[in-house]
Each structure stands twice: as structure tokens, then as C-alpha cells.
Image (cartoon, rainbow, N blue to C red):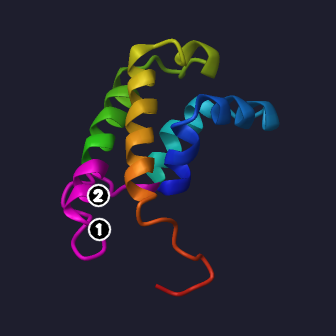
Amino acid sequence: MIEYWEWVSDPDAQRDYQDRVPYVSVSNEAINQWEDWQPYKSPHGQYPLPIYTNEEALMIGRFHEVWNGVAENTLDPIPPLEELAKLSQWQRLVREAHAAYQLFMKRGKFDENEPL
């Protein structure tokens, strides 16, 4: 989730991603990648102590609600990144991703080569 929030929270990283992979819709990726990380119905209650702090669990829920608003209320097909970036809903998603990224970076990323 940290890596997801890292690029979603940074408009320059979003544009760089789009430039590097022009055949992919970064707009769709931002919606679909988050969905890949979440339980089918709702993330609420899915992030227990001691794995996540209460603050982290609340942040995930808050981000999910903002994400869901964007996913539910954005035109289908999702507009290109240049158009989406102008929408207040998208800008809120970017801000919430930034807040989540900052919170989770207090703990940092886990070593992917080390078993949990």
C-alpha cells in the first residue's frame, strides 16, 4: 500500500508513470491497483492490531472512502490523467494518498526479502 500511496500522492510521479508506460491508463491504474489491495466488500475491520495501529486502520478506511467516491463518481471510461487531475475529487484523492503515505512512512516499508 505504501508504494501505491507514494505514486498516487505525487502528480509528477503520476505523469512520469504515464510517460514511461503510455499504453497504460494511469487513471485506471490508480483506481484498480487500490482495489487489488482491498477486501471485496470493505476494508473496515480488516486491519487489526498489532499489524496496524488504530491510526493506520482509520487512515486506510478514510482513504478508501475518498477512493470509493472517485471510483463511483468518475465518468466511465475514466478520463485521461490530464483531465482527471483538474477534478476536485481527484485532487482530494491525491491529498489523502499523501496523508496515508506520510503516516505509513513513520513505520517504513517492510523488507520484501524478509518473511513476516
Q: In x, y percent, where is residue 48? A: 22, 70
Magenta-colored segment: predominant secondary structure: loop
Q: Residue furthest bottom?
A: 115
In the rendered view, tell whether residue 37 sits above or below residue 6. below
Q: Nearer the viewer, residue 116 or 31?
A: 116
Q: CA distance from mark 2 to mark 1?
A: 6 Å
Residues drawn in magenta: 37-60
Q: Nearer the viewer, residue 102 or 56?
A: 102
In reply to whether residue 47 is colored magenta, the answer given is yes
Q: In x, y percent, where is residue 3? A: 56, 54
* Residue, disc 2: 56
Q: Secondary structure at mark 2?
A: helix
In the rendered view, tell whether residue 17 sits above or below residue 85. below
Q: Nearer the viewer, residue 14 or 42?
A: 14
- Marks 2 and 1 close (CB-CB < 8 Å): yes
Q: In x, y percent, where is residue 78? A: 53, 22
* Residue, disc 1: 52
Q: Quadrant of residue 46?
A: bottom left
Q: Residue at x 18, y 61 (%)?
A: 45
In reply to whether residue 24 is colored magenta, the answer given is no
Tell me which amino acid carries mark 1: Tyr
In the rendered view, tell whether residue 32 sits above or below residue 2. above
Tell me which amino acid carries mark 2: Glu
Q: Residue at x 22, y 52 (%)?
A: 58
